[in-house]
Each structure stands twice: as C-alpha cells, then as structure tokens.
C-alpha cells in the first residue's frame, strides 16, 4: 500500500443485494479473523482515495479497512435519477456491502458527506455499528421541518454554495472545468478569497482559473480528474435530495438521538468554516458517548492536511473504547 500509487491497493468490485455495483478497497491485515472492520466513507468531491494516508496505518495495527467509492463516484454505479441518492438508499447499500463482505458490525468512519451518511447509517441500521467517527461535519438529527437549500443559504450564508450545486447548470459547468474546480476546493484554510456565499462558486467555476495552493499534487489531481470522466450527475445528486431525505426520515419517524451505547468521535479542523464550534456543541444533545477532538489550524480536508494526526487520534480512540484488534492480526 503506497499512498502515492492508487493501484497498490486491493481494488474489488461486487454486486450488492440492492442491485448496485460498487467499487471498493478491501485491505486486510495478516489475520483478519480477529480484525474489526473499519468502513470509511468519503465526501464531496472525493473518492476512496481521500483515505489513502489512513489505510496502511490502520491495517498495520490489525484492522480490516474497507473504503468504497460512494454511489455516483469513481467506478461505482452512477444512477441518473436523484432519488437514488437519498440517504436511506445509500445506507441500504452500505448495509448490503457489509453483507457481501460477511461483516456483521463495523466501525463506520465518515468525512464530509460521508460523515452525514455515517450518522444516518447509525439511525437506519443502528445494529450494524460498533462505533462511529465523524470528520469535519458534526452530527445533526433529522429535521422536524423541511428547509430548502435556498432557505438554508439565506439563514446560513456560508452554505450558499449549495444553491449552485443543486442547480441544473452546475452539472455541465463543473464537468467542463474539473481541474479548476478541484484546485479551488482542495485547499488549506489560509486562503483569503471566498467562494461559499450564493453566486460565488459559479463565478469561480466559469472563470476557469487554475489557482495555486491546491493540496493535491499534479499526479493526485490527474487521478481525481480521471475518475470524474462520467460527469458530475452522481456527486451533485447528493445535494438534490434535501426534500426526499426529509420525507423519508419523517415517514419512518427516525429518532434524533444515536444509540445510547454507541461510542462516537467527532474530529474536525479548527480552520474549517463548514464546521462551526456551535454545531459541534449542539451535536452533544443527541449523543450520549461523544468524544470531541479539534485539530488546531487544520481545515476541511483533515485526512490530507493532518494525515498522521487523523490516523493516530482514531487509533487511540479505538483503543480507549476497547476495539483494538488481536495482536496476531497486525502486519
């Protein structure tokens, strides 16, 4: 496993009982009979490759690490209809993936949209988790009232960019400017230009500027672009399910609180504007066993900006909740 070489990882493909075909990394330790499984979920605009720096350290400590390309990304199926990307359906896919792998329960670790999905997985399939780690996006409970993306942008201007991502125009415009789009989003928090407010992101995309300061090197950037050649329909569909998610959660009366005995870690960068401290504090109301770890000066891309810290914090947390693997499982 070499983080600089995507092909050095164990790539797998499988058809799930839900009918979806998923591409995933399945990296096993020496003796995986005694190895807890870590199921890692990426966000937007990412791939399984976003976890490249964490996979080897976790496997070396005896964990089995499974990292799918989420629905619509990379080499996983990309349905064209937005309803396929409701969080309930995504969670059903993840449960089916665990079934395919013969894993009854896993530690679920998410980043960005993967964090939101992981939190909902803990509600839709609470019996499938050993523990939950959410990175960069704190847990929020199901809403009692539907709030449209436009209303959210008015109330929380830092999320105004989502108005563009839900628009039909964004699909083709971002697809035609992938390099500049990735260079804009994969950045550290010390950049002083804003693209988060309504209308700003579209202007950056249409200008097509090749900005400096991207945290991806040229080889990594090329790998991302090569995995987005099918277009942006799938990745952007996550933002287009707001009302459907609300309807599904309301119809099923999903609880607000996570399972009382579920250990939860919230790990975030203090420089991440999309993860305000008040949101982290609010999440404590719904989680009985919450550990919060801020990473000082780190931005949104915690796994890339502070790879060693992320790997070690999660390993230490797993040990503290007695989910260490058997010593015979280590490399």
Image (cartoon, rainbow, N blue to C red):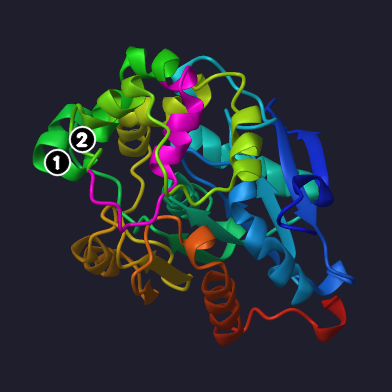
Q: Mark 2 points at which residue?
A: 160
Q: Residue at x 74, y 78 (%)?
A: 325
Confirm whether the magenta stretch covers residue 186.
Answer: yes
Residue 132 vertical position relative to residue 220 in the rendered view, above or below = below
Residue 171 vertical position relative to residue 49 in the rendered view, above or below = above
Tell me if residue 243 can be seen: no
Residue 233 vertical position relative to residue 52 in the rendered view, above or below = above
Which residue is more in the foreground, 207 or 200? 207
Residues at discs 1 and 2 in contact (Cβ within 8 Å): yes
Q: Is mark 1 on a helix, strand or loop?
A: helix
Give the magenta-colored segment's residue range: 174-193
How crowded pointer 1 is (Cα within 10 Å; few <14, some 14-19, many 20+) is rated as some
Q: Which residue is drawn at 14% across and 44% down?
A: 156
**Marks 1 and 2, how far apart at CA:** 5 Å
Q: Quadrant of the N terminus?
A: bottom right
Q: Residue at x 73, y 36 (%)?
A: 23
Pinpoint residue 273: horizontal percent, then vertical percent.
26, 55
Q: In the visual, does 73 lie left or right of 177?
A: right
Q: Is mark 2 on a helix, strand or loop?
A: loop
Q: Quadrant of the C terminus?
A: bottom right
Q: In which quarter of the image is residue 71?
A: top right
Pinpoint residue 328: horizontal percent, then vertical percent.
87, 82
Query: In the image, which disc is placed on residue 317?
Result: none
Q: In which quarter of the image is residue 287?
A: bottom left
Pinpoint residue 305: horizontal percent, then vertical percent.
48, 62
Q: In the visual, does 248 lie left or right of 327?
A: left
Tell me if residue 103 can be seen: yes
Q: Residue at x 33, y 20 (%)?
A: 206
Confirm whether the magenta stretch covers residue 293.
Answer: no
Q: Name the residue under label 1.
A: 157
Q: Quadrant of residue 136?
A: bottom left
């Amino acid at each position: 496993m070499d983080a600089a070489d995507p092909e050095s990882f164990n790539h797998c493909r499988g058809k799930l009982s839900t009918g979806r075909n998923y591409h995933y990394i399945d990296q096993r330790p020496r003796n995986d009979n005694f190895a807890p499984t870590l199921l890692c979920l990426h966000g937007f605009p990412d791939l399984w490759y976003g976890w490249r720096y964490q996979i080897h350290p976790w496997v070396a400590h005896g964990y089995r690490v499974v990292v799918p390309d989420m629905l619509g990304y990379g080499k996983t199926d990309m349905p064209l209809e937005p309803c396929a990307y409701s969080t309930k359906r995504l969670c059903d896919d993840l449960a089916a993936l665990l079934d395919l792998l013969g894993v009854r329960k896993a530690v679920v670790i998410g980043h960005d949209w993967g964090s939101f999905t992981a939190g909902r997985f803990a509600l839709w399939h609470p019996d499938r988790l050993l523990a939950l780690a959410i990175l960069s996006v704190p847990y929020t409970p199901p809403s009692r009232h539907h709030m449209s993306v436009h209303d959210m942008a008015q109330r929380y201007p830092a999320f105004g960019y989502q108005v563009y991502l839900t628009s039909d125009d964004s699909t083709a415009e971002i697809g035609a400017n992938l390099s500049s789009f990735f260079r804009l989003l994969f950045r550290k928090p010390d950049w002083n230009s804003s693209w988060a407010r309504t209308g700003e992101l579209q202007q950056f995309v249409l200008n097509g500027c090749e900005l400096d300061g991207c945290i991806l090197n040229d080889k990594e950037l090329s790998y991302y672009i090569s995995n987005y050649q099918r277009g942006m329909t799938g990745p952007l569909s996550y933002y287009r399910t707001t009302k459907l998610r609300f309807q599904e959660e309301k119809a099923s009366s999903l609880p607000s609180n996570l399972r009382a005995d579920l250990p939860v870690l919230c790990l975030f960068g203090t420089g991440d504007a999309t993860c305000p401290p008040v949101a982290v504090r609010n999440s404590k109301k719904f989680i009985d066993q919450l550990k919060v770890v801020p990473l000082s000066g780190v931005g949104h891309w915690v796994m890339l900006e502070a790879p060693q810290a992320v790997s070690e914090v999660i390993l230490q947390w797993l040990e503290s909740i007695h989910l260490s693997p058997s010593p015979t499982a280590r490399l």
